[in-house]
Amino acid sequence: MNLVDRFDRKHDYLRISVTDRCNLLCHYCVPNGVHDCTSFQHLLTDDEIVNIVQAGAQLGIKKIRITGGEPLVRKGLPKLIGRLKEIPGIEDIALTTNGIFLAKYAQALKDAGLNRINISLDTLNEEKYTKISRNGKLKDVLEGIQAAIDHQLHPIKLNVVLLKDYNVDEIETFLKWTMKENIQIRFIEYMPIGNQQFEWSKQYQSLSIVKNIAETIGIYTEHERKELAGPARTFSFENAKGSFGLIHPISNEFCASCNRLRLTADGHLKSCLFWEAEVPVKAIAHDHHALIDAYKRALFLKPKNHEMGQTMYEQGTPTVRAMSAIGG
């Protein structure tokens, strides 16, 4: 049984937000500096998440990504990952984290069966990092990256959201890092999530600048796409240990090949990050047949395109949850 939507896209990937809480207050995620978090009693329990994933696996879900908020603030996360790893049909589990607590948990995550890791890191400048995160310390993230390397949570991908007035001047530094270390730096276009029209239009930076700067560094080639490559186009310099990727949700949308569904921390299935339609599943999390139907309903609601470009902002947008609430 497969999850194929109205536009003939096969879905085998579920992103699970295990919490909408975060230890950081990054400007582009929570622009007002305040997390509007769900009360604990309304969050999905471990048992409910496992049941929902079991139903998804029966329908063809093979890949899981654990997100937040910041997933490592959820108590007992390694144990939950271990339970998900045991579900028949689940082949790959990845984690997206800000890296602050990664040095503490890397060993436990590896032992639980975590396969891969993505770490959000928009700057290598300590002062700028503290400013954009409002309360984070860069050294904690760098220690987390080293722990991921030490525990071989490969491929290790670093997510860099480009902001015009913030980190464009660091593109060259990030690119040169890939020549020395077996990591993938993924440059991501700033997305207008959570009705941040003015801030987005002011800070949006096209990724074409990355390739322009890469050409000044050396010869690089594009990789052939692999199953777990995700939406990134990946490249590497000659003789480099690592690689760099470009993710264009705005200027070069990848909706036609989208294979993912999302599960919010409070128990809703979403078929698109930037779309308000969602199907509640917390109340039916112990009813396997009802969960099967919920997946099918969520898939039916999936639009052909996310329409996240500039023209949509000129016309007005649907109401969309903040990034921290939907596992962006």
Image: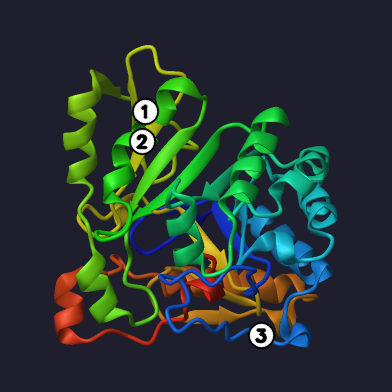
Q: Which comes before the other along the chain, label 3 or label 2? A: 3
Q: Secondary structure at mark 1?
A: helix
Q: Could you tell me the amino acid type at mark 3?
A: Thr
Tell us which disc is closer to us: 3 or 1.
1
Q: Please tell me which residue is depicted at 77% across the width and 52% down the height of the picture.
A: 81
Residue 68: percent from left, percent from top = 61, 65
Relative horizontal placement of residue 164, taking residue 54 as reference (left or right): left
Query: Alpha carbon of mark 3 to alpha carbon of mark 2: how far?
Result: 38 Å
User: Which residue is at 31% across, 41% downward?
Assistant: 171
Whether residue 87 appears in this view of the structure is no
Could you tell me residue 264's position as x and y percent? 60, 73
Q: Are marks 2 and 1 in contact (CB under 8 Å)?
A: yes
Q: Left or right: 316 with respect to 320?
A: left
Tag on residue 173?
A: 2
Compared with residue 240, is residue 307 higher up or lower down, i.e. above or below? below
Examine the rendering and report whether any part of residue 218 can be seen: yes
Label at residue 71: none
**On the rendered structure, is 80 left or right of 248?**
right
Foreground tag (3 vs 2)? 2
Q: Give the mark, 3 or 1, whose residue is nearer the N terminus.
A: 3
Decide which of 211, 134 is in the foreground and name it: 134
According to the picture, the residue beneath numbered tag 1 turns out to be 176
Which amino acid is tagged 1?
Answer: Lys
For label 3, the residue is 38
Q: CA distance from mark 3 to mark 1?
A: 40 Å
